[in-house]
Amino acid sequence: MPFKRVPQKFNASIKEVTVGTGDKAIKLGGENVYPLYSFDEPIKNQPVVGVEISDKGPNRDLPMLAKFYEGAVSIAEVAKKAAAAKGVSFISLYLESADPNGENVPVENCVKLAKEVADAIDIPLVIQGCKNEEKDVQLFNKIAEALEGKNVLFLSAKEGDYKQIAVGVVQAYKGKIGAESAVDLNLAKQLNTVIKQSGIELDNVVMNVGQAAAGYGFEYLVSTMDRIKAAALVQNDSFLQIPIVAPAGQEAWGVKESVTAEADAPKGWGPQEQRGIDMEITTASALLASGANAVILRHPKSIETISNLIAALV
């Protein structure tokens, strides 16, 4: 008996969220099929790839990365080079030096840097905070004010700071926010619900539902993402019909396979940089298959590979 494929089509769809302005703005979400199921229905907006730029600069100890950013002295120059890389749709500036438990760089310095980066690139900008809630509230509101009109996305708003961030970033300065929860469907829905109750329309919101690298509790993350997409499409749950942005690079380049120098690694592990690239590619491709509408990576080789994968599948 011949196989007869029956496409899965849903009356529900993921909300569409626009980041950036002009003809290079990106649209996240909008699909009404499972992740990468372009054989069931055309996917309205294909997943996109961004490159993460730390305010500390790229890791110059990695030969391929050092060669790619050769000649870039300032962070703005680094961002400009990254924006020109094949497959890059947006830049994500990670303000890790602002952490009060680290270098505690002042807010005004971070605002100045964000403006320099925004002026250096012609693609959308994402701002990643320092992961300290109190400092992130200050950072996001001041940067949103300085970059008003550029439709910047700020990652992330959490249970403890979403009110201050949402009011400043979205209501006052017309930016977008990421709702970050800890690998749990119910926590993700609860955060989206209270954001909506605070007066923020959910087409101003993306989700960051948790982070993990492949092999490191990763099955909990992808199963959560699978359940979120199913609830959004099958059950028509409007509080989960929100695009997912996954900062994959931070986790992938932080595990032992990526940070262990070749001299200290077990026999057969191979070059450190290639291990990090492989971990980043593996993590990102699994996140896309589980429903990420955007992934944030660090290495140009990973970005090129994942961009080619998206083009081939979507």
Image (cartoon, rainbow, N blue to C red):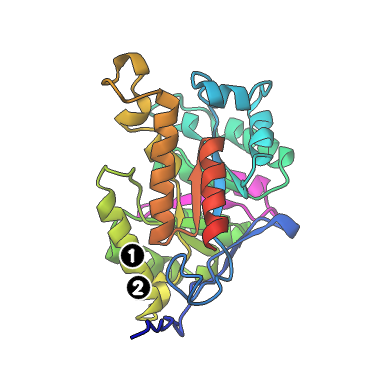
Question: If the image is split into quadrants, where does the N terminus sit?
Answer: bottom left
Read off the magenta span. Answer: 143-160
Q: Nearer the viewer, residue 168 or 52?
A: 52
Q: Is 18 positioned to the left or the right of 15 in the image? A: right
Q: Is residue 81 left or right of residue 232?
A: right
Q: Residues within 10 Å of mark 2 (few under 14, many from 20)?
A: some
Q: Is residue 294 above or below residue 193?
A: above
Q: Which mark is residue 268?
A: none
The answer to the question of whether label 2 and label 1 lie on touching residues, with beta carbons closer than 8 A, is yes
Q: Is residue 200 visible?
A: no
Horizontally, residue 42 falls left or right of residue 149, namely: left
Q: Would you name the residue on which mark 2 appears?
A: 230
- At label 2, which amino acid type do we have? Ala
Q: Residue at x 52, y 77 (%)?
A: 41
Residue 65: x and y, percent?
A: 55, 26
Q: What x and y, as percent, mark residue 17? A: 57, 65
> How far apart, in angstroms, are the residues tagged by discs 2 and 1?
6 Å
75 left or right of 106 in image: right
